[in-house]
Amino acid sequence: MTYAAFRFAALGGTLCATLAMGSHALAAGIPAGTLIENTASASYNTGGPTQVIDSNTVSFQVAELLDVAVASQDASALPITSTTVLTFSVTNTGNGPEPFVLTANPAVSGNDFDVTIDGLAIDSNGNGVYDAGTDVLLANGGTSASLNPDESITVFVLVTAPGGTTDGQTSQVRLLAEADTGTGTPGDVFTGAGEGGVDAVVGSTGADDDDVGSLISSVATVSLVKSVVITDPFGGTQPVPGAIATFTLSATVVGTGSINDLLITDAIPTSTTYAPGTLTLDTNALTDAADTDAGEASASGVAVNLGTVAAGTTHSVTFQVEID
């Protein structure tokens, strides 16, 4: 191998190594504005000592690629409530710092209803949960702060559902992120608009990306059915004095989503006496005292607090009284 070939190979190897390291570190490779330069050499002789000459140095700066990725962070459709918040991630997958225009569109084809966009918010403390008064609010169609290559932000979309939705209806909201420098067909060039005055080139995403978050109208209701079984002192089922009446209260939550603060109460019937220690929830015994379990009972009545209950479930409360 000649000296010139060896030096060129060495330079090329160094350059390739640099490029490879950059491609692992950054989504779009070498950072925008990086100076790449190269000088060639030639060696020769005319019968005497070997002569070495260098070429002129060729240099150029890496252009800025404009790319972005948007992804919904909600595992499933969110039930519509008074404070429904959709969560997305926005990642700069280009190779230079870039702000992004963020727009939430509630009118997605196939929606049963369209929500109102109340605004956007940027997760300021990085906890992944919308904190009113802490997270930075952004108007729909507003621009984020500049994101470094591979930097991600969490974007919250705050929505309100219209009135009149029915149980099980669904809707989607699309969040679009667009490079502030511009969007277009991959390969389009914005001359001098990149980092440090280099050209900005539209990447494979078109310099924009979007994803949808899903919503469901959850209208859960409760049905409550009460039944009684009589056991008399003679082994029969007659409601005579001294007979035991076992009451069962079956609460079924129907629809979708869940209900909150489900409390089942029942008064002890006149002319009967509560049988202490007979209160149960789903066959599990409860104490009569007002303590840490879900129920309490007294001579006047029983109360069982089920708290939050998911739709599609049934819970049963039982207790006994003795006919006076």
Image: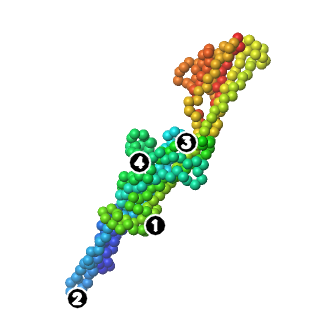
Q: Give the residue furthest to the bottom.
A: 47
What residue did someone put label 2 on?
Answer: 47
**Amino acid under disc 1:** Thr
Residue 127 falls in which quadrant of the image? top left
Q: Distance between the residues labelled 3 and 1?
A: 37 Å
Of labels 4 and 1, the one closer to you: 4
Q: In this view, does 205 lie to the left or right of 280?
A: left
Residue 80 circle label: 3
Q: Where is residue 140 in the image (x, y as percent from the top left)?
A: 44, 50
Q: Cα distance, mark 2 to mark 3?
A: 88 Å
The residue wearing badge 1 is 185
Taking depth in this image into account, of 300 and 112 the one nearest to the observer is 112
Q: Earlier in the sequence, mark 2 or mark 3?
A: 2
The mark closer to the camera, 4 or 2, is: 4
Which residue occupies the foreground of this view, 186 or 51?
186
Choose the circle earlier in sequence order: 2 or 1: 2
Q: Earlier in the sequence, mark 4 or mark 2?
A: 2
Q: In this view, does 42 lie above or below 74?
A: below
Residue position marked by numbered label 4 in the rendering: 138
Foreground: disc 2 or disc 3 = 3
The answer to whether the residues at label 2 and label 1 have Cβ atoms under 8 Å apart is no
